[in-house]
Amino acid sequence: MLVRHLYKVLSRVLIHDLVHRDDSTFSDRSLDVPIWRLRRIIEEDPASPRHVQTLRGQGYVFIPDPDGARNTNTAAQPAPTASTPDRASTV
Protein backbone atom coordinates (compact mmCIF):
# COMPACT_ATOMS: atom_id res chain seq x y z
CA MET A 1 0.00 0.00 0.00
CA LEU A 2 2.84 2.44 0.74
CA VAL A 3 4.38 1.54 -2.63
CA ARG A 4 1.17 2.58 -4.41
CA HIS A 5 1.48 6.03 -2.87
CA LEU A 6 5.14 6.93 -3.39
CA TYR A 7 6.24 10.10 -1.60
CA LYS A 8 2.77 10.61 -0.07
CA VAL A 9 2.28 10.68 3.66
CA LEU A 10 -0.27 8.10 4.76
CA SER A 11 -1.69 8.58 8.22
CA ARG A 12 -1.76 5.71 10.68
CA VAL A 13 -5.57 5.82 10.66
CA LEU A 14 -5.72 5.65 6.86
CA ILE A 15 -3.30 2.72 6.74
CA HIS A 16 -5.29 0.93 9.44
CA ASP A 17 -8.56 1.53 7.58
CA LEU A 18 -7.12 0.25 4.29
CA VAL A 19 -5.67 -2.87 5.89
CA HIS A 20 -8.41 -3.69 8.41
CA ARG A 21 -11.57 -2.67 6.59
CA ASP A 22 -13.93 -4.66 8.81
CA ASP A 23 -12.18 -4.00 12.15
CA SER A 24 -13.46 -0.88 13.88
CA THR A 25 -11.00 -0.97 16.77
CA PHE A 26 -7.95 1.21 16.38
CA SER A 27 -5.02 1.39 18.72
CA ASP A 28 -2.51 4.19 18.34
CA ARG A 29 0.28 1.61 18.39
CA SER A 30 -1.39 -1.04 16.20
CA LEU A 31 0.90 -0.40 13.20
CA ASP A 32 4.21 -0.46 15.05
CA VAL A 33 4.85 -4.19 14.63
CA PRO A 34 3.90 -4.42 10.92
CA ILE A 35 6.02 -1.35 10.12
CA TRP A 36 8.91 -2.80 12.13
CA ARG A 37 8.61 -6.11 10.23
CA LEU A 38 8.50 -4.33 6.88
CA ARG A 39 11.61 -2.35 7.76
CA ARG A 40 13.44 -5.55 8.76
CA ILE A 41 12.71 -6.94 5.30
CA ILE A 42 13.48 -3.98 3.05
CA GLU A 43 15.83 -1.72 4.97
CA GLU A 44 19.59 -2.18 5.04
CA ASP A 45 19.58 -0.81 8.59
CA PRO A 46 16.07 -1.08 10.11
CA ALA A 47 17.11 1.11 13.05
CA SER A 48 17.81 3.97 10.61
CA PRO A 49 15.15 3.50 7.93
CA ARG A 50 15.61 5.19 4.60
CA HIS A 51 12.66 3.85 2.61
CA VAL A 52 9.79 3.58 5.10
CA GLN A 53 10.05 6.81 7.03
CA THR A 54 7.99 8.10 9.91
CA LEU A 55 6.85 11.69 9.77
CA ARG A 56 6.05 12.46 13.36
CA GLY A 57 2.50 13.63 13.87
CA GLN A 58 1.59 12.80 10.25
CA GLY A 59 2.17 9.15 9.37
CA TYR A 60 4.45 7.12 7.12
CA VAL A 61 5.94 7.77 3.70
CA PHE A 62 7.66 5.38 1.27
CA ILE A 63 10.71 6.73 -0.53
CA PRO A 64 11.91 4.13 -3.05
CA ASP A 65 15.36 5.57 -3.76
CA PRO A 66 16.44 8.05 -1.07
CA ASP A 67 19.81 8.75 -2.70
CA GLY A 68 18.51 9.01 -6.24
CA ALA A 69 21.22 6.55 -7.31
CA ARG A 70 18.84 4.65 -9.58
CA ASN A 71 17.10 7.78 -10.81
CA THR A 72 18.33 8.79 -14.24
CA ASN A 73 16.30 11.99 -14.10
CA THR A 74 18.25 14.81 -12.44
CA ALA A 75 15.10 16.56 -11.21
CA ALA A 76 14.53 16.42 -7.48
CA GLN A 77 11.98 14.01 -6.13
CA PRO A 78 8.74 15.58 -4.95
CA ALA A 79 8.50 16.32 -1.26
CA PRO A 80 6.21 14.08 0.78
CA THR A 81 2.68 15.41 0.87
CA ALA A 82 -0.13 14.69 3.25
CA SER A 83 -2.94 12.63 1.75
CA THR A 84 -6.22 12.44 3.60
CA PRO A 85 -6.72 13.99 7.01
CA ASP A 86 -6.73 11.85 10.11
CA ARG A 87 -9.90 11.19 11.96
CA ALA A 88 -7.71 11.21 15.06
CA SER A 89 -4.97 13.67 15.81
CA THR A 90 -2.48 11.09 17.10
CA VAL A 91 -0.01 9.41 14.81
Image (spheres, rainbow, N blue to C red):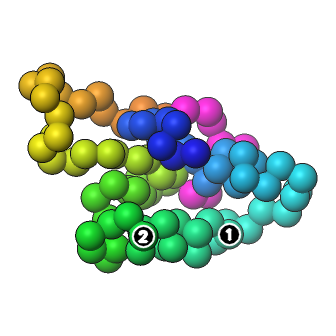
Spatial CA span between label 1 and label 2: 19 Å
Considering only vertical position in the picture, is 39 above or below 20? Answer: below
At label 2, the amino acid type is Ile
What percent of the width, then of the height, locates residue 65? 25, 45
What percent of the width, then of the height, locates residue 35? 52, 66
Is-magenta flag for residue 87? yes
In this orientation, does residue 40 appear?
yes
The magenta-colored residue range is 83-91
Residues 82 and 57: in front is 82
- Residue at position x 12%, y 44% from top? 69
Q: Of the residues tagged 1 and 2, which is closer to the observer? A: 2
Quarter occupied by the C terminus? bottom right
Is residue 43 found left or right of 29 in the rendered image? left
Q: Are there few (<14), some (14-19), or many (20+) residues within 10 Å of tag 1? A: few
At label 1, the amino acid type is Ser
Q: Quadrant of residue 83?
A: top right
The residue singled out by tag 1 in the image is 30
